[in-house]
Amino acid sequence: MHDGDRQGYEVSYNVDGEVQVTPADAAATQETALEGGCTAGKTTMLEAARSAGKSDILDQYARDYPQGPHDKPQSMCPAFGSLRVGLRMKRTATILSGSACCVYGLTFVSHFYGARRSVGYVPFNSETLVTGKLFEDIREAVHKIADPAKLDAIIVTNLCVPTASGVPLRLLPPQIDGVRIVGIDVPGFGIPTHAEAKDVLAGAMLNYARKEIEDGPVPMPVSGKSDRPTVTLLGEMFPADPMVIGQMLAPLGLAVGPVVPAREWRELYAALDCGAVAAIHPFYTASVREFQAAGRPVIGSAPVGHDGTAAWLAAIGEAFNLPSDIVAAAQNQFLPMIKAALAAKPIRGTITLSGYEGSELLVARLLIESGADVPYVGTACPKTPWSADDAAWLEARGVKVKYRASLEDDCAAMEAIRPDLAIGTTPVVQKGKELGIPSLYFTNLISARPLLGVAGAGSLAQVVNAAIGNKDRMNSMRDFFEGVGHGETAGVWEKSPNLHPLFRATNLKKIERAAKAAKASEMI
């Protein structure tokens, strides 16, 4: 029996019903992708992936995650996002298919961030990649570990090279002995940020769970089923925030549902069985698509600060068709407490804000309502309908909102404004401290705090005011280290460092010629 050419791979089945996969064409392009790996360049990797049959998924990624003025992530490998989501789920195994150096880096950073389980890896070489043996090795691996006593699901992730080579994870069995098999492609040349890679996996699992529900009854979530309509929360957040939202929903006769990305498979069923979805983080495009396919309305923004909470509760009331007096009663219960908490812990100073978590606009709203001047907000995430209200609120107060902001955008804003405090990613913080500007890392020091409702109001004041108060200390440190060198001349030298301006100029010309050649090839 022969199944023909499926998107760049020749697929057939032997007498035992086993899939046999060999590349149908583009072997040379695939080999180029393998040899170059991540250094082959975006254009080469994209061409290889399309020639190997990955056009559909790349086109979908381009629609879901539109890129900005810069065409590559300026943070860690995007696959870390999806890897982290899988590693945080109970009874879930993860297998990576990619270059050994990439897998090493991803597993290192995942354990650095607290993962306490092994990450599976299917190695390959040029022969197994080009002949299709890699796919068979992956298939063998999932069969080997698919133990229903231990696992609900196995997540298989193609990194850059297997994606560019067209390794067809879609041909893996959907389940083995009741263990679900979820295959995803997360290439650095197709997914702009690691935050959006979380959505790739969350969306794929929601799609699988939604089809399970459509096929018939599914198991009850371990936590049981709420006796009230629920609101599913979309986006990773501080653990206290869902509880705060639950308190605000209770007077409306509603309950908080699961948080997506979920922590176990059955939570996906409960997430889909909701009355509405709150897109707290607005970039989960694939996940939103699955909720909308299930007929669930999606609400943007979040109950952040006074104005944000008032608007969000009104939107919830509209989504559930609640009487206006019930919504007004809930607003009257919580809004005065939020206003009082904001007034009790004011923030005074000018702050620039940037990050890649997706909650940057929410944090900016909270800072402004606390009294801070925030002239610039940059986010690495794209503009979506679910952040439109936040952007409009900020822009009405004179804030410059930059979607798909690059590192250069964030640093340029900080250097031009010279704020009392810069909140941003690691390189922005580094640059700020070099300039003597107090700086805080967004991910560890800002987003790792409650932001929503009464608990969020005033939660940033202590750390922000303490950092702003360090201005004199930062100036002293800058003066102390003045003259020790910068960049390649940093450090302590017995003699003056040997600089090679001619070599630098020659190398720069090579880089410029390569860039012009790449641009010319894209125009052909």
Image (spheres, rainbow, N blue to C red):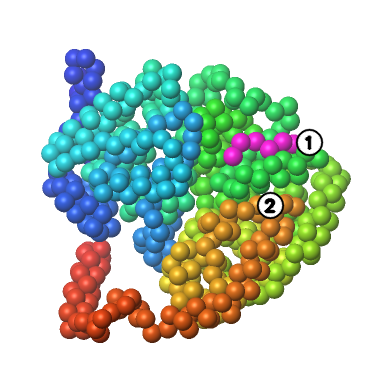
Measuring 35% from the left and 44% from the top, which residue is drawn there?
107
- The x and y percentages for residue 50 are 26, 48
- The x and y percentages for residue 498 are 21, 82
Q: Which residues are magenta?
A: 253-259
Mark 1 neighbour class, 10 Å CA radius: few under 14, some 14 to 19, many 20 or more: few
User: In the shown orientation, is residue 214 left or right of residue 375?
Assistant: left
**439 in relation to 195, above or below:** below
Instruction: Assign the N terminus to one quadrant of the image.
Output: top left
- Is residue 375 something one can see in this rendering? no
Q: Earlier in the sequence, mark 1 or mark 2?
A: 1
The amino acid beneath tag 2 is: Leu
Residue beneath label 1, please?
253
The amino acid beneath tag 1 is: Gly
Is residue 255 covered in magenta? Answer: yes
Measuring 16% from the left and 51% from the top, which residue is drawn there?
35
Instruction: Assign the C terminus to one quadrant of the image.
Output: bottom left
Q: Quadrant of residue 520?
A: bottom left
Residue beneath label 2, please?
452
Is residue 492 covered in magenta? Answer: no
- Is residue 496 something one can see in this rendering? yes
User: In the shown orientation, is residue 169 left or right of residue 192?
Assistant: left
- The x and y percentages for residue 427 are 43, 67
Q: Which residue is more in the foreground, 487 or 162?
A: 487
Residue 96: which numbered mark, if any? none
